[in-house]
Amino acid sequence: MIRKIFSLVALFSLAVAVFAADEPKIEVPLRFDRYYDYNDVVEALEVLHEAYPELTKLESVGESEEGLKIYALTINNKKTGAEHDKPGVWVDGNIHGNEIQAGEVCLYYANMLLTKYGKNEQVTKAVDSNVHYIIPVVNVDGRNHFFKDAHTPSSSRSIRIPKDDDGDGLFDEDAPDDLDGDGSICQMRIKDPNGDYKPDPEDPRIMVRVKPGEKGEYTILGSEGIDNDGDGKFNEDAEGYLDPNRNWGYHWQPQYVQQGAGNFPFSGVGIKAVDEFAAKHPNIIVNFSFHNSGGMWLRVPADNTTVLPASDIAAYDVIGKEAIKITPGYVYMTSVELYPTFGDSDGQMFFVHGSYTFVGELFVREHETYKEKSDKPATASENDRTERNREQLKFNDNVVQGELYKDWKPFNHPVYGEIEIGGWVKMSSRLPHPFMLPDLVHRNASVVLLAANETPKVELEVFEVKELDNNLKRIRVRLTNKNGLSTMTAQAVKDKLYTIDHLKVSGAKVIAGGKINDYRLDQVSYKEHKPEVQFFAIPGHSSTEYEFIVQGKGEVTLEYISQKAGITSTSVSL
Amino acid sequence: MVKKLLHLCFSGMLIVMSSGLKAQSDIGFGKYHTNPEVQQLLKEFSSGNAKLHTIAESPGGEPITVLEIGANLSDVPAIFVGANFEGNVPLATEGALYLSKLLMDSTAYTKDVKWYIMPQPNPDAAAVYFSALKTGQATNLFKINNDGDEATDEDGPDDLNGDGLITQMRIKSIEGSYIVSKEDPRLMKVADKKEGERGEYKLLTEGIDTDKDGKYNEDGVGGINVGIAFPHLFPYENKEAGLYAGQTPEVYGILRFIFDRPEISMVYTLGTSNFCMVPPKGGRKGDASLDKIKIPRRYATMLNADANKTYTMDEAIELFKAVVSPGTDVTPSLVASYLSLGPALNPLEDDLVFYKKYAEDYKKYLKSKDFSTETLDPTPAKDGSFELWAYYHLGVPSFSMQLFSVPKVKEEAEKEDEKDASDDKKKKEEKSEKKDELSEKDKALLAYSDAELDGAGFVAWTKVDHPDFDEVEVGGYAPYLETTPKADKIESLLATQLPWLLKLSTELPEFAIADKKVTDMGGGIYKLELYVANNGALPYPISMGQRNGQPAPVVLTLDGDMELLEGKLRTPLGAIGANQVKKYTWLLKASKNKSITAGIESTVFTDVVEQIKIGG
């Protein structure tokens, strides 16, 4: 009996599972009117690499818990300089296994850089002056299972380390079950004269809570499944849960402080490998980690124990304030304003690797619209929510031809008997329908490109060489950062995170040297020791001047050495 | 180059050692063992039921090893012993070796408990004690650019007086803030302007400004101190901890090794804190009170709570239960995490009960052995230390032991006070002033150095040449003075104190079905009652383990031909106190005279299985 229903449902599900219906060959340029499963992502990276072998390097940074490779595509034009001499731009996605469009944004960014190189000025500049590290899928196991297994839009997020969520000594033994075999975990409801819910009169697919005293028609039973472990609870111990974005080292806190933390920092081998890859590339100055959903650009800090230096906030604003215009409907704020979290990748990238890190929460569901032009402001009352549900369903019916929602269908449940299964399918809610995907990936990749074009670019100009007494000469030099991001985060300078960016004079004996506070008034703060090396970062869109009093003849070289912004040098003949 | 030399030295030692080592371990512990000797001993120990695990490699390329004693045992709880995490307490490493020996020489404490012993988690720092230049440092060879300049590890201390020890240098300087103590000319004190004193000396670590940046010894070789690099209260502000917990491979390897073994239900640490004698310190500010939980405004509406009121944990759990989807288990740890209550910072009251009890017992035990405890107080456990992590994150009893401490100097002034109490006010003032100048610790260290070490514990100030200063003297306390007694004391210190840890091992929880009752309710329905006893002297989990939800559950299982009307096939026991009995009840339908199986199952303790006859 159950089997019969399964086959009936299987027929039905064919109609629903349209995204995977045709499997086109993966070619350059990549297509973005579809979602790539894990194998497709690997293939997409391979074809990009094959098409642009001179500009790309494809490598596995490590393996996941289930032994899948985590790939990084590095885009660098070797003709314009060595990798670590250029500011690095990092883009990753899909650290939560279900947040798959984040992977597509990364692929799109790679595809855009490569296919438009030499054709578009901004792209060409970004490829020539930066190196781009792209990890489209961090949680490879999660993505793989999200496509292969039945899921809700919000499951398959975890690192695949079994965890005993319900404290019964068994691990991952009661996940939801795809009773109707359609590839999605939907909702179960049962007809119940004493239920709390009734169908919305306008759209009976919507369940509306009854008013106090009113009799309902249905009880909602929760996610599709059975009580696999017979403990009287449904679906309470699914895969994990170990949140791959709460398992990083910086400000990690244990499970009882931060849900999903795992047993210790970097207990997940996959994310440990990703972090080690970041550590190997100390030139990275800006990071993007893409997630879904809600439409947000989040910056550090993620918890309220840290205060950022003002100049770092200013640097963030250079990108954040533009990003919200490139992606309509998104907001720009700190991660902690959303809610405090510990052990996320953004803290690690900013405080340990010294990189300006953004989290992009992709997709605004309100963009699934079905309405006439109206000036009426939106509110959040119960009525409006129902109204919004109706609109979403109409969008489903008439804009995406029913592909995001599964109508309630009868099912004979082994425990509950006759029930109905229906609701939003796996590829809905947090993911744009494929027809909206090209817009999403393009806008978000444009933010990354904008950031790449704001990575520090230092210019060095000797603006005065003056003869003094006793065979001494005064050299004055101006350093300008033409772009919006600092050569080094102020936080990293404060923490002495690595060799502080510095200006170094060689070729003559430096008697005195220091920062010019006002060159017209000859106000200089000389450095007491080692005047030939001056340590300082150059914030975005700013200039600073230094003076050196030197003794000697011949060629004097001035070099500004920055771990992230590379080396800029000039020389003068005395 | 230096590394190569060191390596040569070590391999040389190996050759010397291998001939005499057997005798060495037979005659006991008359010396401190070098790193290669420690590893060699462990290799010798590892045969039969003892297995040696290599769990990580230090940045300096040395192995981190754990000796498993009782490798043949399965389904038993385990005790983990770690020693000398800071690398500058060689006696602790000896202690771990000695404990291994005790356990292998007798079967009394290894019948139903497995032991994991890690004598040397910080070999890079440990090697410094045996090197030509002794610094007392706790850091490993992880490369850290401490001063943010162009070079790494370029400006460490230098042995200016050539005595093989890094001590201090006092520099005659008009800018100095120190003067020579009037009470003991060996010591320096900060000049007190109010007393009309004016500084004459600068006090710095012995060395030159190798990188000529105006700072002395600010970027020496190393590194991360393994002893402060664990995740509880990780000291982010201290560069010697690294940038995050587990950044250095020793710590990461230890964390993984221990979490891979849920049977580890007690942890011992040998080092400089002493939880055996002094319960873990409380009084830290910022701990959320679980009796007075505030619900942030943004959650208050959702939870139907009052943001101005405070709630107990039980009340908060009820608020959550009302709004979560059915089937979701609302635990204290879930509530704590959701409301961002933060980590526990102070030992929990219920746990202090057993800590205090065992501290009293331990003092009695030492008294019975004529072992003086009139010594300097143990150091409180450091933020990021292993012993704090074991308690707060593993949630198991964590006992630490300091195997040596310098004897206190008996206060003679006090005796005088007793004799002549007439103008005691003036005397007391003088006394307190004196105390400021020479602390109890200074007095003890100097007296100990004079009496026991012929003054070698304090390097007398002697003039040296210095490139940057005219008048410089080098001197001060010798490194390792506080932690490391003369080698001839090792064996008696270990033999007296370490057996206490064996005794504590017998206090572990132990579960049994103490009683069972089957009541015929009629119609083939039976009530089953099982009484589960914790026959150990420690609760499971301890209070901290309940708070963090970390220790694996102990589960009561039922199996057989029956239908459960009430109750579950698998019932987590929850928390059971020391020597406590708890009752669990089921209602079931079964045929008369059928037998069902009841069990106590866990990954921690020995499983129990019993047959129960229904209606028999």
Image: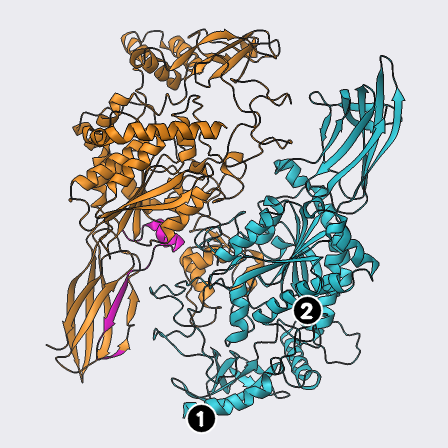
Q: Is residue A357 above or below residue A242?
A: above
| Front-most of residues B555 and B28 | B28
Answer left or right for A485 relative to B604: right
Q: Which residue is mark 2?
A: A364
Q: Position of residue B153 (x, y in %)?
A: 56, 30
Residue A318 painted magenta? no
Q: Position of residue B238 (x, y in %)?
A: 52, 35
Q: Is residue A204 above or below residue A48?
A: below
Residue B545 painted magenta? yes
Colour in which the image shows chain A: cyan
Answer left or right for B496 relative to A462: left
Colour in which the image shows chain B: orange
Answer left or right for A281 relative to B486: right
| Front-most of residues A427 and A560 | A560
**At 75% from the left edge and 71% from the top edge, which residue is drawn?**
A377
Q: Which residue is mark 1?
A: A4
Q: CA distance from mark 1 to mark 2?
A: 39 Å
Q: Which residues are magenta?
A: B539-564
User: Is disc 2 surrounded by few (<14), some (14 to 19) or many (20+) residues within 10 Å?
Assistant: many
Can residue B345 be seen here? The reply is no
Answer left or right for A564 relative to B119: right
Q: Position of residue A237 (x, y in %)?
A: 42, 68
| Front-most of residues A30 and B225 | A30
Q: Position of residue A260 (x, y in %)?
A: 48, 59
